[in-house]
C-alpha cells in the first residue's frame, strides 16, 4: 500500500512491489493475480481505514459543526513527508479519473459511506443553528468534500501546514456565515 501511495499506480513497478512485500514474482501473481488487482486491494484497504477514521473524527465532538471541522482539519497531516504523500484515494482519481470501472466502484462505495455521515452531521449542525437554515445541505456536503480533495492535492504539491489549515478554517467559517 505504501509504495502505491507514494508513487501512484503507473510509476510503481512490479519490482518495487516485490521488494516492498519481500516475496517472489510468482508468489505475487499466485496471491494477487496482477498489479492492478493488488492496487485495488491496497486502495480498498486504504480507503476503508481512512474513511473509518474520517467518520470517527466527524462524530468526535458534541458540536456537529466542530465535528465537520475536525474532519477537514484532520486530513492535514502535521508531518511534512506524510502530508506531501497526499491521499491515496485522491491520487487514484487524479491518475485514473473515471476510466477504471473497478476504481470508480470502490470510490463510490467508500465515498458513499463518508458522504452519508457528513450529510447527517451537517443536518445536525443546521438543526443546532450552527449553520444557517437556508444552507442547502447537499451543496454544503459537496463543498466540504471538494475542499478536502483540494487540500490533499495542495498538500501533495507542497503547500505549507499553515496554508492548508488556513484554507480549512476559511471553509468551515464559510459554512457558519450562511
Image (cartoon, helix red, strand yellow):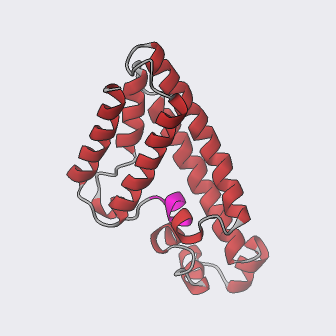
The image shows residue 80 at horizontal and vertical percentages of 28, 61
Residue at 34% in and 52% down: 77
Q: Is residue 99 left or right of residue 51?
A: right
Task: Please say whether residue 1 is visible from this viewpoint.
Answer: no
The question of residue 31 being in magenta is answered with no
**Front-most of residues 47 and 27:** 47
- Kindly indicate the quadrant of the structure image that contains residue 37: bottom right
Residue 108 visible in the snapshot:
yes
Q: Nearer the viewer, residue 57 or 138?
A: 138
Quadrant in which residue 177 is drawn? top left
> Relative to 79, does residue 53 appear above or below in the rendering?
above
- The residue located at (31%, 43%) in the rendering is 168
Kindly identify the residue that appears in the image at 23 percent across and 52 percent down: 163
Specify start and end residues of the magenta stretch as a single range. 87-92
Q: Looking at the image, which residue sits at the far front?
A: 134
Indicate the quadrant containing the C terminus: top left, top right, bottom left or bottom right: top left
Q: Position of residue 10 (x, y in %)?
A: 56, 80
Amino acid at each position: 500500500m505504501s509504495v502505491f501511495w507514494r508513487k501512484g499506480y503507473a510509476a510503481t513497478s512490479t519490482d518495487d512491489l516485490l521488494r516492498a512485500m519481500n516475496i517472489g514474482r510468482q508468489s505475487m501473481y499466485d496471491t494477487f493475480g496482477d498489479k492492478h488487482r493488488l492496487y485495488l486491494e491496497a486502495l480498498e484497504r486504504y480507503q476503508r481505514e481512512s474513511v473509518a477514521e474520517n467518520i470517527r473524527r466527524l462524530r468526535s465532538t458534541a458540536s456537529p459543526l466542530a465535528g465537520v471541522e475536525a474532519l477537514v482539519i484532520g486530513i492535514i497531516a502535521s508531518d511534512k513527508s506524510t502530508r506531501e504523500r497526499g491521499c491515496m484515494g485522491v491520487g487514484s482519481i487524479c491518475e485514473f479519473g473515471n476510466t477504471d470501472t473497478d476504481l470508480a466502484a470502490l470510490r463510490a462505495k467508500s465515498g458513499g459511506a463518508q458522504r452519508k455521515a457528513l450529510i447527517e452531521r451537517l443536518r445536525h449542525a443546521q438543526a443546532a443553528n450552527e449553520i444557517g437554515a437556508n444552507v442547502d445541505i447537499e451543496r454544503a456536503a459537496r463543498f466540504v468534500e471538494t475542499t478536502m480533495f483540494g487540500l490533499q492535492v495542495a498538500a501533495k504539491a507542497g503547500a505549507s501546514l499553515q496554508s492548508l489549515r488556513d484554507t480549512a478554517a476559511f471553509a468551515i467559517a464559510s459554512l457558519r456565515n450562511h
